[in-house]
Image: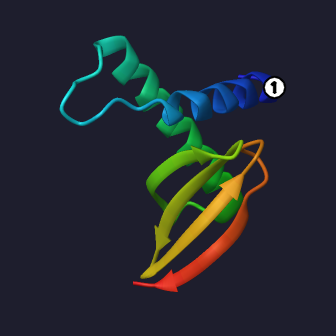
Amino acid sequence: MKRRHFLALLSAGGTAISHVTPAFSAPAAPDRHRMQQVTQKMTRSIHAHFGSGFELRSTHVAQGRTVCVIENRGNRLRVSSRDATTWFVESATPM
């Protein structure tokens, strides 16, 4: 997969993540599959930037940027990115 295609999928995925349906209404199977793909790509991007020990805990889109909560060895980081390739640490807290 080429880098541009990967980035396009990530940016499209950020939009898909912002439109998550409420818990009481199950999304259709294709939507669920798409969300799983986006989550996997987001996880790969975070692993590429921070290392493989980090786990993606939550993600949402706010003010045009993707915000994720990640964990590693008892530390929880809130990170954000506008392009899903460059991540910035907004806050870090011990668990």
Is residue 23 positioned above or below 32 on the image?
below
- The answer to which image quadrant residue 15 occupies is top right
Q: Position of residue 86 (x, y in %)?
A: 79, 53
Left or right of 80 on screen, residue 13: left
Is residue 26 positioned above or below 40 on the image?
above
Q: Identify which residue, 83 or 62, lies in the foreground.
A: 62
What secondary structure is marked by label 1?
helix
Q: Position of residue 88 (x, y in %)?
A: 74, 64
Instruction: List the residue tagged with mark 1.
Output: 4
Q: Which part of the image, by quadrant, shows the N terminus?
A: top right
Q: Position of residue 65 (x, y in %)?
A: 70, 46
Q: Residue furthest bottom?
A: 94
Is residue 28 positioned above or below 47 on the image?
above
Q: Residue at x 29, y 20 (%)?
A: 27
Q: Identify which residue, 29 or 73, lies in the foreground.
A: 29
Q: Residues within 10 Å of mark 1 (few under 14, many from 20)?
A: few
The amino acid sitting under disc 1 is Arg
